[in-house]
Image: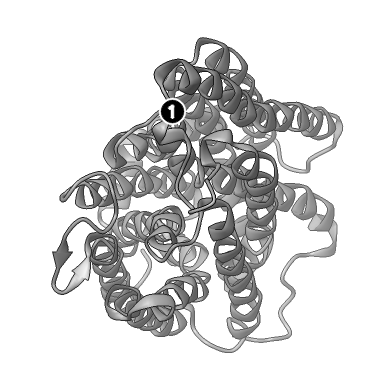
Amino acid sequence: MNPKTALVPKKLILPFILITSLFALWGFANDITNPMVAAFKRVLELNNTQASFVQLAFYGGYFTMALPAAFFIKKYSYKTGILLGLGLYFLGAMLFYPAAAWESYGFFLASLYILTFGLAFLETTANPYILSMGPESTATQRLNLAQAFNPMGALAGLFVAKEFILDALQSNNTDADGNIIFTSLDESAKAVIKTADLMVIRDPYVMLGLVVLGILVVIAMAKMPESKDSNSKVDFKNTMRRLLKNRNFVEGTLAQMFYVGAQIMVWTYIYQYAEVLGISNAEAVNFGYAALLVFLAGRWICTFLLRFIQPRKLLSFFSILAILFTAGAIFLPGMAGLYSLVAISFAMSLMFPTIYGIALEGLGEDSKFAAAYLVMAIVGGAIMPTLQGMILDLGGSNYDDIRILGVSEVNFSFILPLGCFIMVLLFSLRAKNLVST
């Protein structure tokens, strides 16, 4: 790769900035939601499997809406797809208000599900749009640059989750001995706290909805250079036939599903891992911050390295790092295991945009539907955390009820991310010998 090749042509810099800002917006939604698994578990007294339905609803929305989003932007335009995505994002966030009033977990899940309809539109639109904004030789590097702003939004989301939700939940209060007070209260006292805590969870999402509405208005008023395709006719059957013959795309979609599943497991269950070590959910957010900071650092470092190293080779190296760090999270005792769990985020930093770029390489107009399937692959974030929650429930609702292979079930549960990173490594090794079609 020629390090002198321009990442983005000058005439496309403003559209690039506007679309890149959306990466931070869905990063915020992702990381304000990850700690909600632990929050809903405590407030609504759920088991681990039930609490994991937060991620099932959130990432299930991606799976449901990604392909319809591809049809929509094929028929209309990137800008229209973005506006519809922002509208659905706004609607889902505002539905937290009636969900809290009804005190219904199912309503909260439905709100998250609709919110991620909007995120599916945004990701299906923004990722291939960024890839198209310049030479194909720099496409993967360009997407890594745009994706580097995603963890910035994620850090903001995590900050709001800690400062305005987890720290404010009365159900998290402890007595002088460090025991949770909420669990020992009678039902009437619990009901009062439950009502107050669900409002605490509600308010940041409602404020987020208002911010999204403001961004929708700004983008609606902005001029974007690309409207709809010169050929908006949908030839889905022939497109799918071509895509299924492209091994880079097929195997990349599977690798993306395993990667996203691993990422969400690592970022969701860091709180449960820390709790076994005597660290409260609110304090564990600091380790979530650390994970996102090393993730962000990794994104910027990888954006630089991709100017000199082939994406496939770098992906192989980072996959091996992820496997080693995950093994450390499983088998290293005490804080060493937690630090290893945090370090996985550095290894993950390269994966999503690089798998994405390799899978879409050389697909031309077919990339719009291919991008939809890669967004649908985010369903790994819905399935894998639920499976991990089932492992955590093997011995009871706590996280260290039993020992498996000499470690607690929360440590052992990270065998699932380990398997996912092995699948990403296999993709990177096979992809070296694949030729785009």
Asked if one can make out residue 433 in the rendered structure from this viewpoint, the answer is no
View extreme (bottom): residue: 308
Q: Quadrant of residue 290?
A: bottom right
* Closer to us: 422 or 4: 422
Residue 88 placement (x, y as % from top left): 59, 24
Residue 313 placement (x, y as % from top left): 42, 85
Q: Quadrant of the C terminus?
A: bottom left
Asked if one can make out residue 14 in the rendered structure from this viewpoint, the answer is yes
* Closer to us: 48 or 294: 48
Q: Reply above or below: 401 against 186.
A: below
Q: Is residue 226 left or right of residue 233?
A: right
Residue 27 placement (x, y as % from top left): 61, 49
* Closer to us: 13 or 154: 154
Residue 157 placement (x, y as % from top left): 65, 47
Q: Is residue 385 left or right of residue 206?
A: left
Q: Which residue appears at 72% of the width and 41% of the height?
A: 226
Which residue is denoted by mark 1 in the rendering? 185
Marks counted in the figure total 1
Q: Reply above or below: 227 against 196.
A: below
* Closer to us: 255 or 239: 255
| Helix, strand or loop for disc 1 | loop
Q: Residues within 10 Å of mark 1 (few under 14, many from 20)?
A: few
Q: Quadrant of the N terminus?
A: bottom right
Q: Reply above or below: 306 against 242.
A: below
Color encoding of the figure: one colour
Amino acid at the residue labelled 1: Leu
